[in-house]
Image (cartoon, rainbow, N blue to C red):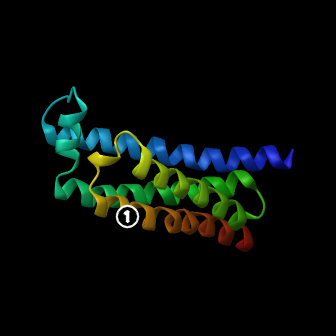
Amino acid sequence: MDIIRSIVAVLGGIGLISIVVEALEFTLVNAVSGGTITDMQGYFAVRNQPAILVAKLGYNSVGAVLGGYLTAKVAGRQEMRHGWAAAIVQTAGLVWGFTGGEFAAFTPVWMRIALVLVTGPAMLAGASIRARAVRSGT
């Protein structure tokens, strides 16, 4: 059962990142646009504004910290090892999506690079927070 718990921990952490990031991004883009956007061109036109992209780095990092924390908490042991596994899977997914995904061209190259460089370490920070809490008994 440990392997199942490990898989659930890693996938749960990655899933949480997607939920947090997509919900925040969708809400922010619609708020900035002043209404509901009905097509991808319009969505990315708003999302790729400089202020939104800076915010994206922030909310992606927050989502990644939360995802890393959840991964470590659900794992219940070897928190950092599970955090590393989740960070590697998430980073691989980002690299694949940003190089071969159908919407890759809609995200500026500098943002793709920044997200790949920031997301994994943010996940490890979240796992580390949980690991330290376990060691301190809280």
Q: Residue furthest front?
A: 100
- Would residue 29 be visible to someone looking at this image? yes
Q: Quadrant of the C terminus?
A: bottom right
Residue 55 lies in quadrant: bottom left
**Mark 1: which secondary structure?**
helix
Depth check: 102 or 2 in front? 102
Count of numbered marks = 1
Residue at image location 20% in from the left, 35% down from the top: 41
Residue 35 left/right relative to 19: left
Depth check: 54 or 42 in front? 42
The percent position of residue 24, horizontal first and vertical second, equals 34, 44
Residue 127 left/right relative to 24: right
Residue at image location 52% in from the left, 69% down from the top: 121
Residue 20 lies in quadrant: top left
Residue at image location 59% in from the left, 50% down from the top: 13
Q: Which residue is mark 1?
A: 113
Residue at image location 73% in from the left, 72% down from the top: 135
Residue type at mark 1 is: Ile
- Would residue 138 be visible to someone looking at this image? no
Q: Residue furthest right?
A: 1
The percent position of residue 12, horizontal first and vertical second, equals 62, 44
The percent position of residue 48, horizontal first and vertical second, equals 21, 50
Residue 133 left/right relative to 61: right
The percent position of residue 89, horizontal first and vertical second, equals 60, 54
Q: Quadrant of the N terminus?
A: top right
Dot 1 crowding, Cα within 10 Å, few <14, some 14–19, many 20+: few
